[in-house]
Amino acid sequence: MNLKKINFGNYGLIITFIVICIFISIMTPKFLLPQNIRNIMIQVSINALIATGMSFVILTGGIDIGVGSVAALAGIVVTAICKGFPETSIFFYIIIGLLVSLIVGVLCGGFNALVITKFNVHPFIATLGMLSIARGFAFVYTGSKPVFGLPDSFGWVGQGYIGPIPVLVLIMVIVLFLAHIFLDKTVLGRYIYAVGSNEEVAELNGINVKKIKFLVYILSGILSSLAGVCLASKLISGQPAAATGYELTAIAIVVMGGISMTGGKGKIWNTIMGLLTIGVINNGMSLMRVSSYWQTIVMGFIIVAAVSIDQYKVKKS
Amino acid sequence: MTNSFLVEIENISKSFPGVQALDSVSLNIYSGEVHVLIGENGAGKSTLIKILAGVYQKDIGIVKFKGKSVDFQTPRQAMKEGISVIHQELSLIPDLTVANNIFLGREKARGQFLDNNYMVDKAKEILESLELNIDPNIKVESLNTAQKQMVEIARSISWGSSMVIMDEPTSSLSEKEVKSLFNIILKLKKENVGIVYISHRLKEIPEIGDRVTVLRDGKIVKTLPVKETHEKKLISLMVGREIKDYYHFKTQQKKEKIDKILEVTNLTSEPYFRNISFYLGKGEILGIAGLMGAGRTELLRAIFGIDQFQKGEILLKNHKTRFNHPDKAIGNKIGFITEDRREQGLLLDKSIVENISLPIIKFRANRGFIDKDWEKKVSSKFKEKLRIRTPSIYTTVKSLSGGNQQKVIIARWLAAESDILLLDEPTRGIDVNAKAEIYALMNDFVNAGGSILMVSSELPEILGVAHRIIVMRKGELSGILSRDEATEEKVMHLAALK
């Protein structure tokens, strides 16, 4: 019986997705062109990285709303460093990009986790602090001016292709695949579910709950930073105001996909479905020339609706 | 007892997807009677009272309350009409005062402001009428479980309830607290309140009940006056067959000298317990008796490394140990079965497999990857061995009965190959069949060389199962009894008076 319920949930998601696709393709024939589908994939790829980190955090029952700011900060740091090395290879930029993602991610995520576990601050408030802190650093560091003057080769990750596949899409696929393996097959992945399901039970069964929280906030930090680096590469500049509102999109993706806000329930498969659905909705609205302000309004309604459905499911079970 | 029916239930049925929870049930309840409902888990007791209380709605049938046909849509409606429920999980708000809790949902107001003076006076009146010595001004969080229950009862009286449903009210009470609950029930009877009383403790039925109804598989087996029945008969009605004297189940007696596997000296963790010294032998079941709040659970938690102790020493297999996290205790082959299995024992929305393997997956992992074959194998093995009744090992534990849930937790620690099990009220809220099975498992475990430290508030259980009994009173060790010298009277004496 339980199995049926889960299946129905998944079908529900797929049906919603298909209905939305049919609706948009009727409204605008451009939607199904291969070029547009590739655009959608590129558009969602940066959000996908953040949403993956967000999935880990939400699975433990937490939330990370500082992701957009952390991404912006990482974008600033990587462009500021790379600007000093204009005559090097793409490979060098990639190494710098990964190092920056790692360092900024560990620092910001570690700080979040410290505040949450050590001082018992609610994750919403702790990461709300980070939202302001990281963004503030991005502006202070640049004197609120964008970082320009990078060579075109810096843009390879954000704009380049390997064969027919955009690099960004490749990164997204790798990250989602690794995240799936991590959650489904490893002990730490299992612990993430246990913590989200019931912290006390997890602790009594020998799981170091604080350590798991450090892990998820740091992973969220690293993936947000990686997203910020990719975004900087795509724009070939560091924008202190970049990735504003990305936390909203990431949360929308995760809950739309059906990962429960109360923690412990959901798979990367859900994140992928949420990603595609949100990506298609956004793309459809752009094709239909809905203004970006209206898109923001729609996104807000989607979050509220998705969480309401989640709450309804929680109550029913 | 008057002769008017307070509640008349005629042929009600209720089904959930896949289950016929109630099948054409008819039952009458008089004003001023204590009507005991018994039955195994899943027999339909909870569904029945939830329909009476407006939580569920019946599919078909008639419910008459005070002669009038009713169909409550919400618990609030039922309460307004005069039916209230004292749930197993208490529904008080810890941050509010006793008086505010009693008036929760229908606060007395003067204009837009709460009339606290009125509520406190009125609450005091009600508490006094129940001869309860509870200050209406203190916060509920500072009360013990028994007192909270009394506050719930006071609340239902303040609603002017003419029927009170009590769902296993004694399951978390000590023997002494049970007495005071029974006094209150007698008072309610005198005021012509009808009481529906659900219990797993068959022993208390003759003491408090007037009539008893036995439910099995959603049907009523029989309703009969308590005077005309006895424990064994009730058990056979509940399970549909005779089962052997489960309360008088005896673990095999130990011979001569035993090796000490765990030795505790002067263990102190203020304000919970102090200067506790005892040893646990290999192959022994050591019972810890005492009243609620005697510090027994806290003692287990300190040994397991959940809470830190201030003074004293723990020797495990002759090595001094002090665990700063349950992780370490588990690594040293100790398992802990908590008193509250839903909140502290199980990941309710996870599968049996995940619940069994939880503490040990990391020891069995291959470079951080879960050994799913092993996990499946070990779960299947213990599902068979402990006869866990479930459609599949991938079923979520939430959908299992209490007894089967407890078996999953036992399976967990058997799979972990524990040497020592710390058990806290291992059979609370479990039906008689499953109880007997769990005692048998404990017996097998110690016969295979394991050791058990068991906290229990059920005297027959502790007297029947433990080889030796230590008794705690207000955080202190008040005595150690061998099985031969232990009697209910002696244990109670050490636990309560001394």
Image (cartoon, coloured by chain):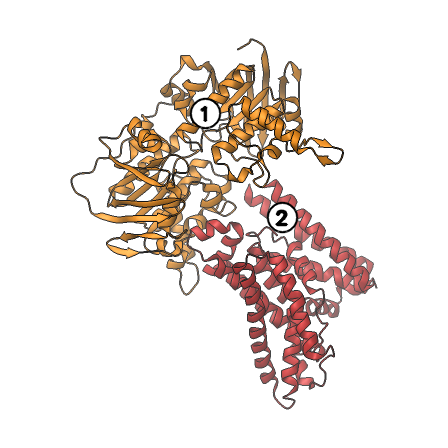
Chain colours: A red, B orange
Residue B108 in percent (x, y) is at 69, 30
Residue B94 in percent (x, y) is at 56, 40
Residue B361 in percent (x, y) is at 41, 56
Q: Nearer the viewer, mark 1 or mark 2?
A: 1
Image quarter of residue B47: top right
* Residue B463 versus residue B371 in the image, above or below: above
Give, as a three-letter code, the residue at label 2: Gly
Q: Quadrant of the C terminus of chain B?
A: top left
The chain letter for the residue carrying disc 1 is B
Secondary structure category for the residue under label 2? helix
- Badge 1 is on which residue? B180
One can see residue A305 in this view? yes
Residue at image x 42%, y 34%?
B428
Secondary structure category for the residue under label 1? helix
The chain letter for the residue carrying disc 2 is A
Most extreme residue toward the top, as rendered? B3
